[in-house]
Amino acid sequence: MNQPSRRDRLKPVELLVLSGILALFVGLTVLLSTREIVLSLIFFGIAFIVVLVVMAMFSLSIKPNEIEQHEIDDDGTGSAPGEDTRPSGH
Protein backbone atom coordinates (compact mmCIF):
# COMPACT_ATOMS: atom_id res chain seq x y z
CA MET A 1 0.00 0.00 0.00
CA ASN A 2 1.33 3.41 -0.93
CA GLN A 3 2.08 5.90 1.80
CA PRO A 4 0.32 9.25 1.46
CA SER A 5 2.50 12.05 0.22
CA ARG A 6 3.68 14.82 2.49
CA ARG A 7 1.21 17.19 0.88
CA ASP A 8 -1.67 14.79 1.59
CA ARG A 9 -0.61 14.42 5.22
CA LEU A 10 -0.30 18.18 5.78
CA LYS A 11 -3.61 19.11 4.14
CA PRO A 12 -5.63 18.98 7.41
CA VAL A 13 -2.96 21.06 9.16
CA GLU A 14 -3.15 23.66 6.39
CA LEU A 15 -6.91 23.92 6.84
CA LEU A 16 -6.60 24.30 10.61
CA VAL A 17 -3.86 26.94 10.39
CA LEU A 18 -5.65 28.97 7.74
CA SER A 19 -8.93 28.91 9.65
CA GLY A 20 -7.07 29.82 12.83
CA ILE A 21 -5.44 32.83 11.18
CA LEU A 22 -8.72 34.08 9.75
CA ALA A 23 -10.51 33.51 13.07
CA LEU A 24 -7.74 35.35 14.89
CA PHE A 25 -8.24 38.30 12.55
CA VAL A 26 -11.97 38.32 13.32
CA GLY A 27 -11.35 37.97 17.05
CA LEU A 28 -8.83 40.81 17.12
CA THR A 29 -11.11 43.03 15.05
CA VAL A 30 -13.98 42.48 17.48
CA LEU A 31 -11.66 42.97 20.48
CA LEU A 32 -10.26 46.25 19.18
CA SER A 33 -13.67 47.61 18.26
CA THR A 34 -15.65 46.58 21.37
CA ARG A 35 -12.96 46.07 24.07
CA GLU A 36 -14.89 43.03 25.35
CA ILE A 37 -12.79 39.87 25.65
CA VAL A 38 -15.72 37.46 26.02
CA LEU A 39 -17.43 38.77 22.89
CA SER A 40 -14.11 38.56 21.04
CA LEU A 41 -13.65 34.92 22.09
CA ILE A 42 -17.18 34.07 20.98
CA PHE A 43 -16.60 35.61 17.56
CA PHE A 44 -13.21 33.87 17.34
CA GLY A 45 -14.82 30.47 17.97
CA ILE A 46 -17.66 31.04 15.55
CA ALA A 47 -15.31 32.31 12.84
CA PHE A 48 -12.95 29.36 13.35
CA ILE A 49 -15.72 26.81 12.93
CA VAL A 50 -17.34 28.56 9.96
CA VAL A 51 -14.05 29.04 8.09
CA LEU A 52 -13.00 25.45 8.81
CA VAL A 53 -16.27 24.03 7.48
CA VAL A 54 -16.26 26.26 4.40
CA MET A 55 -12.63 25.42 3.55
CA ALA A 56 -13.32 21.69 4.01
CA MET A 57 -16.33 21.92 1.70
CA PHE A 58 -14.27 23.74 -0.91
CA SER A 59 -11.55 21.09 -0.73
CA LEU A 60 -14.16 18.34 -1.15
CA SER A 61 -15.70 20.04 -4.16
CA ILE A 62 -12.48 20.03 -6.19
CA LYS A 63 -12.64 17.48 -9.00
CA PRO A 64 -9.71 15.02 -8.86
CA ASN A 65 -7.35 14.92 -11.82
CA GLU A 66 -6.71 11.77 -13.89
CA ILE A 67 -4.01 10.32 -11.61
CA GLU A 68 -6.08 10.90 -8.47
CA GLN A 69 -9.15 9.36 -10.11
CA HIS A 70 -7.11 6.28 -11.03
CA GLU A 71 -6.00 5.93 -7.39
CA ILE A 72 -9.59 6.30 -6.21
CA ASP A 73 -10.84 3.68 -8.67
CA ASP A 74 -8.01 1.24 -7.87
CA ASP A 75 -9.33 -1.31 -5.38
CA GLY A 76 -5.91 -2.81 -4.59
CA THR A 77 -6.66 -6.37 -5.83
CA GLY A 78 -4.18 -6.26 -8.67
CA SER A 79 -6.69 -7.64 -11.17
CA ALA A 80 -7.05 -6.46 -14.72
CA PRO A 81 -9.31 -3.43 -15.24
CA GLY A 82 -12.03 -5.43 -17.05
CA GLU A 83 -12.23 -8.37 -14.66
CA ASP A 84 -15.11 -8.69 -12.23
CA THR A 85 -13.68 -9.55 -8.80
CA ARG A 86 -16.97 -9.51 -6.89
CA PRO A 87 -18.13 -12.79 -5.41
CA SER A 88 -20.94 -14.51 -7.27
CA GLY A 89 -24.44 -14.53 -5.78
CA HIS A 90 -26.10 -17.57 -4.21
Image (cartoon, rainbow, N blue to C red):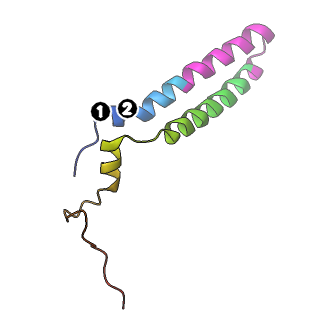
- Front-lying residue, 77 or 65: 65
Q: Quadrant of residue 73?
A: bottom left
The answer to if 28 sits in the magenta stretch is: yes
| For residue 32, above or below residue 66 | above
Amino acid at dot 1: Arg
Which residue, as the protein is rendered here, is positioned at the far bottom?
A: 90
Q: Quadrant of residue 10?
A: top left
Instruction: Please give the residue where the numbered disc 1 appears in the rendered image.
Output: 6
Which residue, as the protein is rendered here, is positioned at the far right?
A: 34
Specify whether 70 is left or right of 78.
right
At numbered mark 1, what does the secondary structure look like: helix, strand or loop?
A: helix
The residue range painted magenta reads 19-39
Instruction: Please state the horizontal and vertical placement of residue 81, each as a whole percent of the image.
Output: 24, 62
Residue, x 56% and y 39% (percent of image)?
A: 57
Instruction: Please state the horizontal and vertical placement of residue 79, each as a whole percent of the image.
Output: 20, 65
Residue, x 29% and y 41% (percent of image)?
A: 4
At numbered mark 2, what does the secondary structure look like: helix, strand or loop?
A: helix
Graded by Cα atoms within 10 Å as few (under 14), some (14 to 19) or many (20 or more), the crowding at tag 1 reads few
Q: Quadrant of the C terminus?
A: bottom left
The answer to if 46 sits in the magenta stretch is: no
- Front-lying residue, 25 or 58: 58
Dominant secondary structure of the magenta stretch? helix
Amino acid at dot 2: Leu
Do labels 2 and 1 touch, CB within 8 Å? yes
Residue, x 66% and y 29% (percent of image)?
A: 45
Specify whether 73 is left or right of 77.
right
Instruction: Please give the residue where the numbered disc 2 appears in the rendered image.
Output: 10
